[in-house]
Image: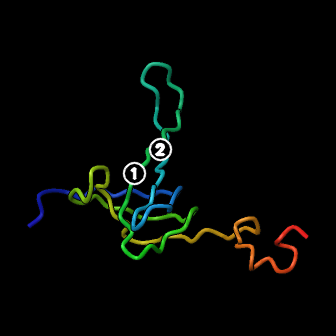
Amino acid sequence: MRRGKVKTRVGVVTSNKMNKTVVVAVTQIVHHPKYGKHVKKISRFKAHDEKNDCRIGDKVFIIETSPLSRTKRWRVSKILERATLLKAELPKEDLGERGNGE
């Protein structure tokens, strides 16, 4: 039985250092009521990631859920777009012989 429309957001993962939790930044462009200027507003949500599958830079779809912890009220529904891996993000063992500074 549904009580209303479920809130959904699309954002980018900014941190995945916690176990089964990611921080998702959702960007909105809002119109300032007094000055009329368009202002970028960034909201950060902690979302539940059951499989620890999300990486930094991934574009994800999150939905609102009942409270899972003190600050976690969202969960990752699906990963829309994977982040491209940069050379600086590769582990040292993948860089070969030059990864250790020699």
Q: Residues within 10 Å of mark 1 (few under 14, many from 20)?
A: many
Residue 76 percent coordinates (x, y): 38, 66
Q: Please tell me which residue is depicted at 36% across the width and 73% down the height of the picture.
A: 50
Ranked by sequence position, the earlier of labels 2 and 1 is: 2
Image mark for residue 86: none
- Identify the secondary structure beneath mark 2: strand
- Identify the secondary structure beneath mark 1: strand
Q: Please tell me which residue is depicted at 12% across the width and 63% down the height of the picture.
A: 2
- Which quadrant, please, contains the C terminus? bottom right
Residue 88 percent coordinates (x, y): 75, 65
Compared across the picture, whether 84 is left or right of 44 comes to right
Q: Which residue is mark 2?
A: 28
Residue 14 percent coordinates (x, y): 53, 55
Q: Residues within 10 Å of mark 2 (few under 14, many from 20)?
A: few
**Residue 33, placed above or below residue 15:** above
Residue 44 percent coordinates (x, y): 44, 47
Specify the amino acid type for callout 1: Phe
Q: Please tell me which residue is depicted at 52% across the width and 64% down the height of the picture.
A: 59
Compared across the picture, whether 29 is left or right of 97 comes to left
Mark toward the viewer: 2 or 1 = 1
Q: Please tell me which residue is depicted at 27% across the width and 50% down the height of the picture.
A: 70
Q: Which residue is mark 1?
A: 45
Number of marks present in the image shown: 2
What colour scheme was applied to this rendering of the protein?
rainbow
Q: Quadrant of residue 1?
A: bottom left
Q: Quadrant of residue 7?
A: bottom left
Specify the amino acid type for callout 2: Gln
Q: Disc 2, disc 1: CB below 8 Å?
A: no
**Residue at the top extreme?**
34
Compared across the picture, whether 85 is left or right of 28 comes to right
CA gap between label 2 and label 1 equals 13 Å
**Residue 87, placed above or below residue 26:** below
